[in-house]
């Protein structure tokens, strides 16, 4: 077996807490790798005016696989105010380094599995007939286009004159034609056929490999005719190659209603960037929330794996740490899957499932407690104890 090198980017806040826990589990399962740590996040912004140092980019370009914890982002003016004094006049503008990574390496496919672990007190439940309570088993895997759409960053307040003139060619722009520039904000939703095709292909290939009977495209083509329309067109095209996998089409608004009504009806779901962001959080909320939400960012040759949660600064300084490491650990299993180490990935997921099912070791979020130092006295496991329990269950 080749020994891999994995670039670790703990980042800020609880990213620095949960990432080392994932490495403990990877070691315990027998994954052989070298780890090189690379800087990313707020410290680098303050001290270098760049939250995504070139060295980090180079390490990823070399080693192709990264584990990422979380970063802290702040609004533009707050970011500028915290910059080291000697850097303030240099014209640095803050940008999100994880969005930067997705763009630099064209990590255009985001995968976010939202799968129920039976026994998790945070699982969605609903009332059934005759006052019964049902806990539907959710098994949804969201494929989110990760680089385009409304998050591509092509936007203006007070758009340049040439752009305004071009917009005026569109009959639907009429009601906005007399709005003063400073009162007019435009964020553009850009879809390309190549990216639509790729996210749909990845979704169908995954459904095929994992035995899902259908893929749901969740967009809004009746209103967003051009962009959503293109995604649906490509989805239908790709589906022709998978006669055994049905294609369902839903609208994002209706989907948000249905996901709490009949979440068990969904399997692989594919969507553009914003809608994929929304539905993946929606489904994550049914299976444990941020403590459980894992994700992969995958390009043609680079993969970066990260929990969905952020840096949760208010919990970063607690000693012992109390945050749930499962989202990060599950993100590491997605890395193993991507590297072809599915046996080890499955062993880790089974160990997580066993700990959750047994219910003796639960972090504060699983006990529905408000986070703080006193949760330990109330019976919550520390971050490390949760990891220990998972390692103990590795078969
Ligand atoms: P957050 O995800 O950091 O935390 C929100 C709340 O979720 C926390 O206060 C905590 O109650 C809970 N939580 C998060 N992770 C948890 C875990 N592992 N275990 C248990 N509970 C957990 O989001 P927030 O507070 O909106 O943002 C904090 C910072 O993180 C901001 O600077 C934001 O910009 C950044 N952020 C970074 C992301 C990334 O690195 N990909 C994603 C989201 C936010
Ligand atoms: Mg989100």
Image: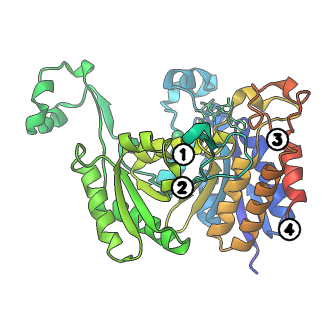
Are the residues flagged by discs 4 and 1 in contact, CB closer than 8 Å? no
Is the residue indicated by label 1 positioned so its CB lies within 8 Å of ligand 2? Answer: no
- Which residue matches tag 4? 395
Quadrant of the image containing the C terminus? bottom right
Across and down, in percent, residue 259 comes to 48, 44
Classify residue 15 by image quadrant: top right
- Element on which disc 3 rests: loop
Residue 285, horizontal then vertical, whole percent: 59, 40
Q: Residue at point 27% right, 50% down?
A: 227
Q: Earlier in the sequence, mark 3 or mark 1?
A: 1
| Marks 2 and 4, the one that precedes in the sequence | 2
Mark 3 or 4 closer to N-term?
3
Taking the image as four quarters, which one is ligand 1 found in? top right
Does residue 120 appear in the picture of this structure?
A: yes
In the picture, residue 78 is in which quadrant? top right
Spatial CA distance of label 2 from label 4 is 26 Å
What residue is disc 1 on? 283
Q: Earlier in the sequence, mark 1 or mark 2?
A: 2
Within 10 Å of disc 4 (Cα), the crowding (few <14, some 14-19, many 20+) is few
Left/right of residue 170 with respect to residue 290 in the rendered view:
left
Distance from Cα at disc 3 to Cα at disc 1: 21 Å
Instruction: Please name whichever residue, 360 or 13, is drawn nearer the observer in this view of the structure.
Output: 360
Q: Are marks 3 and 2 in contact (CB under 8 Å)?
A: no
Question: From the viewer's perspective, is 334 left or right of 232?
Answer: right
Q: Is residue 38 visible?
A: no
Kindly identify which residue carries mark 2.
140
Query: Residue sitting at 89 percent across and 34 percent down?
Result: 320
Q: Percent from the top left, x then y, of residue 187?
A: 31, 35
- The residue closer to the viewer here, 331 or 53, is 331
For disc 3, the marked residue is 362
User: Is 389 situated left or right of 107 in this image?
Assistant: right
Label 4 vs label 1: CA separation? 29 Å
């Amino acid at each position: 077996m080749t020994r891999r090198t994995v670039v670790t980017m703990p980042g800020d806040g609880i990213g620095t807490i949960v990432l080392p826990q994932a490495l403990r589990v990877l070691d315990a399962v027998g994954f052989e790798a070298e780890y090189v740590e690379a800087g990313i996040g707020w410290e680098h912004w303050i001290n270098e005016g760049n939250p995504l140092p070139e060295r980090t980019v180079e390490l990823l370009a070399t080693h192709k696989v990264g584990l990422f914890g979380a970063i802290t982002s702040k609004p533009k003016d707050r970011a500028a105010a915290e910059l080291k004094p000697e850097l303030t006049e240099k014209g640095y503008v803050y940008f999100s380094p994880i969005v930067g990574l997705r763009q630099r390496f064209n990590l255009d496919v985001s995968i976010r599995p939202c799968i129920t672990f039976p026994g998790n007190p945070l699982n969605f439940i609903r009332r059934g007939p005759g006052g019964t309570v049902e806990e539907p088993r959710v098994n949804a895997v969201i494929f989110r286009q990760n680089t385009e759409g409304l998050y591509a960053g092509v936007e203006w307040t007070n758009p340049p004159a040439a752009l305004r003139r071009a917009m005026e060619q569109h009959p639907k722009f009429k009601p906005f034609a007399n709005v003063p520039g400073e009162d007019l904000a435009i964020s553009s939703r850009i879809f390309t056929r190549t990216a639509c095709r790729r996210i749909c292909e990845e979704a169908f290939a995954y459904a095929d490999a994992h035995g899902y009977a259908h893929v749901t495209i969740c967009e809004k083509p009746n209103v967003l005719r051009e962009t959503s329309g293109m995604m649906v067109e490509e989805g239908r095209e790709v589906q022709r190659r998978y006669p055994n996998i049905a294609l369902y089409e839903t609208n994002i608004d209706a989907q948000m209603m249905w996901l709490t009504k009949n979440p068990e009806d969904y399997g692989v779901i594919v969507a553009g960037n914003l809608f994929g962001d929304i539905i993946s959080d929606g489904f994550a909320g049914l299976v444990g929330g941020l403590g459980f939400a894992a994700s992969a960012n995958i390009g043609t040759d680079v993969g970066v794996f990260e929990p969905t949660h952020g840096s949760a600064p208010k919990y970063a300084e607690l000693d012992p740490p109390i945050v749930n490491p499962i989202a990060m650990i599950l993100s590491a299993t997605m890395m193993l899957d991507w590297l072809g180490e599915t046996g080890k990935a499955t062993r880790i997921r089974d160990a997580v499932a066993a700990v959750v099912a047994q219910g003796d070791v639960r972090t504060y979020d699983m006990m529905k407690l408000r986070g703080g130092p006193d949760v330990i006295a109330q019976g919550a496991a520390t971050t490390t104890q949760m990891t220990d329990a998972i390692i103990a269950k590795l078969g």
